[in-house]
Image (tube, rainbow, N blue to C red):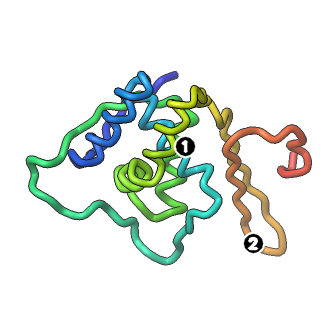
Amino acid sequence: MAIDTTLNVHESTLRRIDRITSITGRARNRVIVDLLTRVMSDRGKQFATGCTVRYQRRDNKEKWRTVHVRLSEDEVDYFRDLRGVYKRSESLLLAEAAREYLSDIIREALRGVKSDNHPFQNYVLSRHEAEGLIFWTICWGFPPTPQNHFKL
């Protein structure tokens, strides 16, 4: 089931996204999901703990746009986790991703590399208790051997 939501996007980020759409021919929604999914895949991105969620810098009200996005149920969960793990709003993560991955996406499109519309499928949240502690395992995707990762 698709879930409709909105993101508050600065016009400079929107220009980057629209540049990607014009070069790749992909819909804006697909580009936004692709950018946020690249954040999920970025092993070098540093997570944060012990702080509040950061938001984009303030700017004139006229420079912000409300962008409607349609996400799958899994994507909603993935992106909510991104917010919690990286302690950044989805809009800030999108702005950073548009800056960081813009050239990669354009270069791939010009070489004819197709993006995977569903690089992560399924979402698993597992709770396990041991030695008086509670462990949460979040899985973006589904492992071929779930018994090795989750207490079934």
The answer to which quarter of the image holds residue 147 is top right
Residue drawn at x 72%, y 55% is 137
Q: Where residue 5 sits in the image (x, y, percent)?
A: 35, 34
Label 2 residue SS: strand
Q: Which residue is mark 1?
A: 37
The answer to which quarter of the image holds residue 20 is top left
On screen, 69 above or below 45?
A: above
Q: Earlier in the sequence, mark 2 or mark 1?
A: 1
User: For the residue carrying disc 1, how many other residues have a C-alpha within 10 Å: few (<14), some (14-19), or many (20+)?
Assistant: many
Label 1 residue SS: helix
**What's the distance in space between the residues labelled 2 and 1, CA to CA?**
31 Å
Residue drawn at x 40%, y 71% is 52
Which sits in the foreground, 24 or 92?
24
Nearest to viewer (mark 2 / mark 1): 1
Would residue 93 appear left or right of 79 to someone viewing this image? left
* Disc ID at residue 149: none
Tell me which amino acid carries mark 1. Thr
Q: Where residue 72 sits in the image (x, y, percent)?
A: 52, 29
Q: Where residue 73 sits in the image (x, y, percent)?
A: 54, 32
On screen, 52 above or below 142?
A: below
Tell me which amino acid carries mark 2. Leu
Would residue 44 appear left or right of 6 to someone viewing this image? right
Residue most toward the front?
111
* Disc ID at residue 133: 2
Q: Quadrant of the C terminus?
A: top right
- Do we see residue 87 in this rendering? yes
The answer to which quarter of the image holds residue 145 is top right
All told, the count of numbered labels is 2
